[in-house]
Amino acid sequence: MNKAYNFSAGPAMLPADVMTKMQSELLEYGNSMASVMEISHRGLDFMEMSQRMEQDLRDLMDIPNNYKVLFMQGGASSQFSMLPINLLRGKSIANYVNTGQWSVKAIAEADRYCDVHICTDSHSNGYTDIADFDDWSIDDNGAYLHYTPNETIAGLEFDYVPEVDMPVAADMSSTILSRPCDVSKYGVIYAGAQKNIGPSGLTVVIIRDDLIGRVIKKQPVLFDYSTQANNNSMYNTPSTFPWYAAGLVFQWIKDSGGLTNMAKVNKEKSQQLYTKIDDSDFYSNPINPRYRSWMNVPFVLADGSLDKLFLEKSYNANLLALKGHKSVGGMRASIYNAMPLEGVKALIEFMSDFEKQYG
C-alpha cells in the first residue's frame, strides 16, 4: 500500500499506531475469544475497557469531578436538539453565536424550541472574521450561550472562550483534544468523534452535573441527559467499536505527550501551512489571521480554472481529500491530531511544485 496523507474534514485520518492496534485485535479482543464488535457491552471485558476509556479522557482534559462524561450516538447534530431540551430549564431565550454553517444548523434547530437571540453574526463578512466580544449583544435572560469554537467549513476559529453569566455550550467537534482546554469554563462540551477522537458513530458530551435532569416535558427519553448519565451511557446498546477505537486514540494521545504536545505539533503544522500560503501570490486564505483555524485550512488558487488539475495531481501524489466544501470552493486541508508534520510538509512541497509549474 502506498503511503498517503488523508486531509479529509471527517471522517478523518486516524493515527497509524491506532489502526495497527485495531488490526491486530480485530478477530479477538484481549482473551475474549471474540471481536470487540461481538462481545457484550455489559460483559467484563467491555466494561473494563469503557471505564479505562472514560478515565483516560478525564485525565487528558483534566475534567472536574462535577462533570459527567457521556458517550452517545446521533452525531453532534443530535446535540443541536438536546441542548435546548435540557438547558432551557424554564426559560424561553437562548443566546447563539453565528460564525459559520455549523452555527447556522445549531441555530435552526434551537429555533424549534425557544427564541434564539443572535449575539454576533459573521455572515455579513462571509464567515471570515469574528466581531470583538465587546460588540456582542448578549441577552441576559438567556438560558445559555452556544458557540462553535472552530467552524470546519470556513476555517474560522476562536482564540478565547466567551465569558458570560450563564452556561456556555460549545460544539468542539473539530477542536477537542487538539490542545489543553479549561473544561470548568463550560456548561456543556460536545463533539462528534470523526475528527480527533475516532471513527464516526460516537458523540462525546461533557456536562456539568447541575445542568442534568430538568428537560422540556414530553421529550424522547434518549434526549434527556440524565437517561445516559444514570446508565453509564448504556441505556441502550452503544456504538461498541467506536468506543473501543476512541479508547485507543486516548491512549495514543497520552503516549504522545498529552494535549500540551498535541498543541505544540498542531500549532507548528498550521503555521507552516499558513506561511506557505501567505508567502505566495498563487494561494490565498481569506480568514482574519487572528482567527485562523489550526485544524481546517481553506485556501484558493489565484486561477480557479486550475482547481481540477490541482486535485488530480495532488491525489496522484497521495495527498487525499483536499477539495474544499462546495459552499466555499477551492481547497481545504484538515490537519487534525493524526496528521503528522511530515504530511503537511509533503503538501507544502506539492503546492510549491504546482505553483512553479502553473503559476
Image (tube, grey):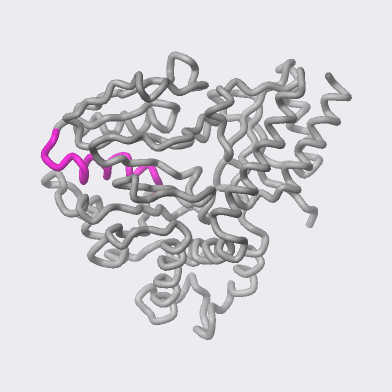
**Does the rendering let one see residue 154?**
no
Query: Residue 238's x, y, as percent?
Result: 37, 63
Query: Residue 191's x, y, as percent?
Result: 42, 48
Q: Identify which residue, 273 or 154, lies in the foreground.
A: 273
**Does the rendering let one see residue 286?**
yes
Does residue 30 lie above or below 289 as drawn?
Answer: below
Would residue 138 be counted in the magenta stretch? no
Does residue 121 lie above or below 33 as drawn?
Answer: above
Q: Quadrant of residue 185?
A: top left
Q: Residue at the far right: name it.
A: 357
- At x 50%, y 33%, the residue is 157
Q: Identify which residue, 67 or 148, lies in the foreground.
A: 67
- At x 22%, y 59%, the residue is 227
Query: Residue 149's x, y, as percent?
Result: 44, 37
Does residue 51 lie above or below 122 as drawn?
Answer: below
Is residue 263 left or right of 273 when viewed as pictured? left
Is residue 48 left or right of 280 when viewed as pictured? left
Q: Which residues are magenta?
A: 75-91
